[in-house]
Image (cartoon, coloured by chain):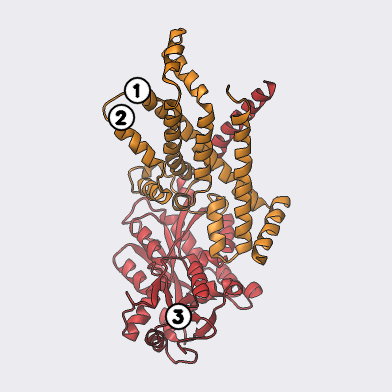
Amino acid sequence: MDLIFEGILKAFHLIFTLDPEVLGITLLSLQVSGTATLISLFIGISIGTVVALTEFPGRRLVVSLINTGMGLPPVVVGLFVTIFLWRNGPLGFLGILYTPAAMIIAQAVIATPIVMGITLAAIQALPKKLRLQILALGATRLQMVWILVKEARLPLLAGVMAGFGGVISEVGASIMVGGNIKGYSRVLTTATVMETSRGNFDVAIALGIILLLLAYFINLVLTHIQQRERPR
Amino acid sequence: MKQKKIIHAVLAGLAVLLVLMAWAPVQAQQKNIILSTTTSTQDSGLLDVLLSIFEKKTGYFVKTIAVGSGQAMAMGQKGEADVLLVHSPAAEKKFVAEGYGVNRRIIMHNDFIVVGPAEDPAKIRGVKGTPQVFKKIASAGSLFLSRSDKSGTHTKEMAIWKEAGINPEGQKWYQQTGLGMGQTLNIASEKKGYTLADRGTYLALKKNLSLDILAEGDAILLNVYHVIEVNPAKWPKVNAAGGRAFADFMVSKEVQDIVKTFGVEKFGSPLFFPDAGKKEEDLGK
């Protein structure tokens, strides 16, 4: 128990003294996971909407694949991204293995199916007649899609939170493709793993608390946007 | 509604900033060195000290990938690392002989120790010779935790079992963690088991462990670290100049002097002993 108490003290110490290393690690976590979530939003929402609104052969297969992707194990993603980005791998010419950019790619791969799956469910949950109604009012197809997405913003923001929560807390892929390099690709989760294996449990607990606080504040902002005007 | 616009603007601004900042640190390739090394050099904190000096001096940026010696050499074999700092001599010799590495140079050593609970259920305290110690653990059927990750420590452990003439694989008392040294020590401490550890990691974690050193000081327990440059003839993309610069730095007097005193202040005794220029065969005499 003493250890947990020490960890909490350490966390506040690190936060209030604005420890430059911890600050850098926290900012990088935010940058990497934030960028990855943004990328996953563009891809996830657009593909999710298209699949939700169109009929095509094999649609059920696609939907089941997307839903499976929502549980994509980060280590498996990490492994494949690493192999692709190796110097002598198919994307080796990019030279971005062990950089924050590689971590963004891996995390975007993890978050995209989550956002896509939730988008799909959210758009499909809208009443069917709504589409006809919007079109009948003279909207173009693009306008209709835009209105539908806006109409589904409550579950869509839940998707954003799920995607962001999935990647900010993820460690397997980040450590594999980022390498946990000091001052460069070290994020909160990988630093926690390292401090634990170094036996610095107080620092590890402190980093964990900072991660939780960070996740809490991000979700607070998102929840604020989500709940600001309740439909109906 | 004004509030809404402000939040939108802030969010959009943040988003753009995030994208810009995350991509900024992508640096030119030739200035990067990928150092593949064992976890003990990173977990002990030695590398943090050495790398900041090296980077300031040369302008190179070192990407340390801390893995077991086995995986470090596997990366070297694929040309995915430029220079290795490892401690698995038999595998290293094979690595160099097969042409994957060049210029294998000795850096430092410390030693392995057998640790276990103070009660010592297998009565190994004071037993002469590490293979004998392992035999006693096996015949007593006491819990032994193995790294089983092809690290230098694991390779050493397997060599000792072989010397003892015992195949522990599949035995009830033999558990394989597949984890790093620090985690394996924690598990051994919690489950009151024996394990083979490098002294540096043990000293660094000692305050949280209920494990005692029960056997030490045998010649077979010597733990030697070498630096190896990955052969650029095999893999043209390897940063040969950078790898060479790092290897030269590790054998320099400056580094050797730091190694000599590293950890004395924090742990009461040095974690590593500098060996540059010596021959492996002469160590431990």
Disc 3 + disc 2, Cβ < 8 Å: no
Residue under numbered circle 1: A54
Shown colour of chain B: red
Residue A82 in view: yes
Query: Which mark is drawn over residue B222?
Result: 3
Q: Farthest residue to the left: give it.
A: A57
Q: Are marks 3 and 1 in contact (CB under 8 Å)?
A: no
Q: Of label 1 and label 2, which has the lower sequence position? A: 1
Q: Amino acid at mark 1?
A: Thr
Q: Position of residue A147 (x, y in %)?
A: 49, 18
Q: Nearer the viewer, residue A119 or B134?
A: A119
**Label 1, label 2: how many angstroms apart (C-alpha)?**
9 Å
Give the CA distance from mark 3 to mark 1.
67 Å
Task: Give SS at disc 3.
Answer: strand
Residue A176: horizontal and vertical position, in percent? 44, 52
**Callout 1 touching callout 2 (CB < 8 Å):** yes
Residue where numbered disc 2 is placed: A59
Q: Is residue B178 above or below residue B282?
A: above
- Residue at the spot x=50%, y=35% of the render? A159
* Label 2: element kind: helix
Residue B19 is marked as: none
Q: Colour of chain A?
A: orange
